Image: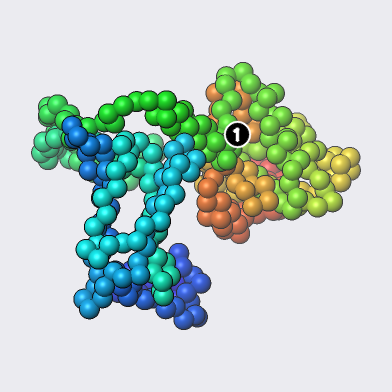
């Protein structure tokens, strides 16, 4: 069913569920039940006035025939990822709660519970939207531009719409910033910056400046040393030098190594021995000296452009090939959805040929020319 796009779309239009993302629903029974008590929960911030500070306003609307009896609201406030307030209140019969906060510069969440049904509504901590920027830019249809898709002389072409020059109106802000920028506000800004740094560290974002070749090599070596099950290197320019530069760091007792390269890595002008011969020699040397057995595959053409390093279940995206990483300014980052890339690389392996077979084809081609 998942292979049938029309079937998946049919279900998605009616149940609003993409079964490609919720595969566990296939072959199972799923109960989808609406809230039996609450029809609507409103939560918004009321700006400060001369006499009052900022307030959070809640409105609870019951379903027909239901009352708000037995409902409680638990609120929890956070500032700089620390819990600063936690309160539980009974929801009044009219469904209105107006809570004075002074200044709402943190994040605010709530849970609505019922004495019989349990949790009815939940909202994770989130900040209130204070300002909206409006920028009006009148547009009109410009001319169509036709360009070739590639650089080849017989490359097909495509059309796209050119922008029509126009003068945008000055941006306008609707809403007011926080009244005060106290220590908590400054700490919040600093915490946000640290969160971005932590996220970059989590995903392995690493910048290597120009001339940091050794630093980049040592970083990749250290990651390969941590591998416990598999290493896959996909690099269209992966050649013999990189085998010695990196793969001695792999533990041969626990880790399989698969390389996916291309014909581009073995191009040479009458080099004796050839790059392919040097690559083969280095593979044997790696096996003899370190016990690392490598499965190498060669793509029949340069269908692979980007470079990827798979370590166990993680995938690194490399801005440069392993043979030049760090020579010039380079970036590598660990991808948040590695499965998609691993699946695509496995599909590429099915269309590649083993390195030994590539060498045989290369030898036949040379014999035919001579």
Residue 334 sits above or below residue 219 on the image: below
**Between 12 and 62, the one nearer to me in the picture:** 62
**What is the x, y in percent for residue 35?**
33, 72
Tell me the residue at 41%/75% (across/down).
116
User: Which element carries disc 1, helix, strand or loop?
Assistant: loop
Percent of width and height locating residue 314: 62, 48
Q: Relative to 157, is 348 above or below?
A: below
Which residue is nearer to you in this view: 52 or 143? Answer: 52
Say whether residue 369 is left or right of residue 283. Answer: left
Q: Quadrant of residue 112?
A: bottom left
Q: Residue at x 38, y 46 (%)?
A: 108
Report which residue position mark 1 lands on: 321
The reply to whether residue 241 is visible in this rendering is no
Label 1 environment density (alpha carbons within 10 Å; few <14, some 14–19, many ≥20): some
Q: Nearer the viewer, residue 175 or 136?
A: 175
Q: Is residue 117 visible?
A: yes
Q: How many marks?
A: 1
249 up-or-down from 97: above or below: above
The quadrant holding residue 93 is bottom left
Residue found 57% across the figure and 40% down from its top: 202
**Quadrant in the picture for the N terminus:** bottom left
- Occupied quadrant, residue 68: bottom left
Residue found farthest to the top: 211
The scheme the figure's colours follow is: rainbow
Say left or right for 336 vs 125.
right
Which quarter of the rendering shows the C terminus? top right
The answer to whether 180 appears left or right of 125 in the picture is: left
Front residue (pair 238, 178): 178
Kindly identify the residue that appears in the image at 63 percent across and 43 percent down. Answer: 309
The image position of residue 169, as x and y in percent, is 12, 29
């Amino acid at each position: 069913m998942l292979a049938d796009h029309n079937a998946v779309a049919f279900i998605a239009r009616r149940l609003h569920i993409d079964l490609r993302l919720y595969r566990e629903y296939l072959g199972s029974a799923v109960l989808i039940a609406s809230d039996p008590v609450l029809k609507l929960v409103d939560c918004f911030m009321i700006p400060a006035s001369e006499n009052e500070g900022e307030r959070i306003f809640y409105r609870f609307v019951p379903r027909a025939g239901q009352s708000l009896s037995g409902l409680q609201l638990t609120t929890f406030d956070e500032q700089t990822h620390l819990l600063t307030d936690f309160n539980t209140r009974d929801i009044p019969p009219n469904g209105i709660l107006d809570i004075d906060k002074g200044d709402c510069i943190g994040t605010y969440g709530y849970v609505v519970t019922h004495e019989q049904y349990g949790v009815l509504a939940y909202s994770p901590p989130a900040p209130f939207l204070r300002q909206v920027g409006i920028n009006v830019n009148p547009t009109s249809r410009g001319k169509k531009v036709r360009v070739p898709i590639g650089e080849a002389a017989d490359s097909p072409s495509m059309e796209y719409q050119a922008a029509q020059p126009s003068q945008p109106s000055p941006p306008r802000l609707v809403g007011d910033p926080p009244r005060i920028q106290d220590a908590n506000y400054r700490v919040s800004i600093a915490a946000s910056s640290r969160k971005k740094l932590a996220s970059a560290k989590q995903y392995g974002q690493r910048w290597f400046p120009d001339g940091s070749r050794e630093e980049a090599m040592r970083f990749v070596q250290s990651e390969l040393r941590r591998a416990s099950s598999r290493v896959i290197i996909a690099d269209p320019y992966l050649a013999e030098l990189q085998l010695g530069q990196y793969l001695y760091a792999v533990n041969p007792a626990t880790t399989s190594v698969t390389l996916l390269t291309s014909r581009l890595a073995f191009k040479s002008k009458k080099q004796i021995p050839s790059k392919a011969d040097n690559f083969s020699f280095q593979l044997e040397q790696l096996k003899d000296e370190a016990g690392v057995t490598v499965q190498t595959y060669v793509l029949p053409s340069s269908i692979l452009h980007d470079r990827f390093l798979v370590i166990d279940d993680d995938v690194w995206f490399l801005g440069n090939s392993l043979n030049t990483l760090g020579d010039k300014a380079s970036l590598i980052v660990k991808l948040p959805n590695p499965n998609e890339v691993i699946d695509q690389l496995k599909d590429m392996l099915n269309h590649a040929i083993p390195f030994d077979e590539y060498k045989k084809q290369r030898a036949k081609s040379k014999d035919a020319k001579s």
